[in-house]
Amino acid sequence: MPRQILLAAGATPVRLFGAWNGDVSREAAELLGAADVVAARVLDGVLSGLHDDLAGLVVCNDSAANLRVYYVLRLLAERGRIPYPVQLLDTPRGGGQHVNLFVAQQYERLAGFVSGCTGQAVDASSLSDAAAREKALAEALGHVRDLRVKGALSGSAALRCYAAAAQMAPERALAAIDAVLEEQAAAAPAPGTMVAVFMTGSSHPDTTVYEALEQSGIVVAGEDHDAGDAAWIGQTVDAASPGEAFSALAELHALRPPSASRSLASERTDHLLAEVRRTGAAGVVALVRDLDDGPVWDLPSQREALAASGTWLAGVVRVPAEGAAAATAELIASVQLSGEIAS
């Protein structure tokens, strides 16, 4: 969701990521049913009271699993199980006059919901202040992307930067990003010692997989999932009124990188090819969790298009709930077979 609106309403956006590993309670599993396990871990965190300090919860309809989480939480909120209100944000991709109008209306509803949680109305002045705060994050994350392409910043460090930006007030996030960059400056590997790859497939809620790859001489120079380079952080608009801001943000939303579960495979392939060129990656790696809708459908056309340009793709699909370590080991072995790193 557009962070500028939340900041303008006096809120701090705190994204709930889930994790690659960890138990899922029986209650969460039964309530959610067959769905991406990362969504189940997010639900579990809410049910356990881990996030009771929140003022409200917005669930973005970015996947089938997220939509299931929303329906479960809405019911539980109505029964008093959750101490804060829950709202669905449904913003389809594609753009165009009618879609953009619908998205703008969704943003108006979002602003009303968040203002109801905080008691602060969204107006032109608060939107302007929020834009200034968010633009500083945009510059910092642009620097992060540049450092990755130069080989001066690891993929796991970049994910930590994005996580800070997604879970903290902009000022705190900037300090956290600076700390990560300082730490990396002292620990960066020598140029040319790591094989740079591009990551596609499922989103990565934490650094588990990236760190395992790095220990094997593989560094992720970029990714197309929304916990990394495709995160919608730092995008702002200048507008004379909230209505104009909502419309302008809807137009920006239409230009976002295509998501695996809400975009055509052809759009995803075109974006992947452009990002591989941008990052200079030697190849592409993909991990797809079981029941994660979308990513596995992309791989055949992506592999074919990459092969035509002389680039390899190594992927592992249907990764089970506790299968991150084994899947990553299999992925590393596939990259070794490509001849890029020694076995």
Image (tube, rainbow, N blue to C red):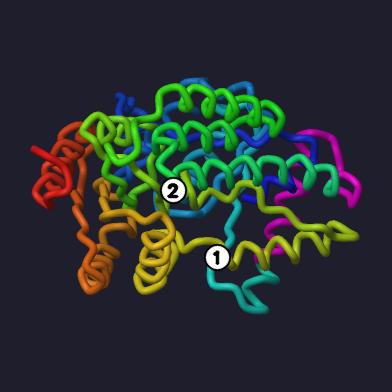
Q: Is residue 112 magenta?
A: yes
Q: Is residue 134 magenta?
A: no
Name the image quarter holding residue 332. Answer: top left
Q: Secondary structure at mark 1?
A: loop
Residue closest to the eye, 112 or 195: 195
Task: Say which of marks 2 and 1 sits in front.
Answer: 2
Please, what is the dominant secondary structure of the magenta stretch? Answer: helix
Residue 193: image location, x then y, percent:
27, 37
Query: Is residue 302 placed above or below 233 in the rendered structure?
Result: below
Q: Residue at x 26, y 47 (%)?
A: 287
Residue 115: image location, x then y, percent:
79, 41
Q: Secondary structure at mark 2?
A: helix
Residue 110: image location, x then y, percent:
71, 50
Which disc, if any, is residue 278? none
| Residue that carries the numbered disc 2 in the rendered image | 149
Residue lying furthest front: 191
**Amino acid type indicated by mark 1:** Pro
Q: Residue at x 37, y 32 (%)?
A: 207
Q: In the rendered structure, which disc, 2 or 1, sits on the residue that comes first in sequence?
A: 1
Name the image quarter holding residue 189. Answer: top left
Region of the chain picked out in magenta, as a range:
103-126
Name the image quarter holding residue 63. Answer: bottom left
**Circles 2 and 1 in contact, beta carbons < 8 Å:** no
Q: Quadrant of the C terminus?
A: top left
| Residue that carries the numbered disc 1 in the rendered image | 92
Residue 17: image location, x then y, percent:
46, 35
**Amino acid type indicated by mark 2:** Val
Residue closest to the eye, 36 or 166: 166
Q: How many marks?
A: 2
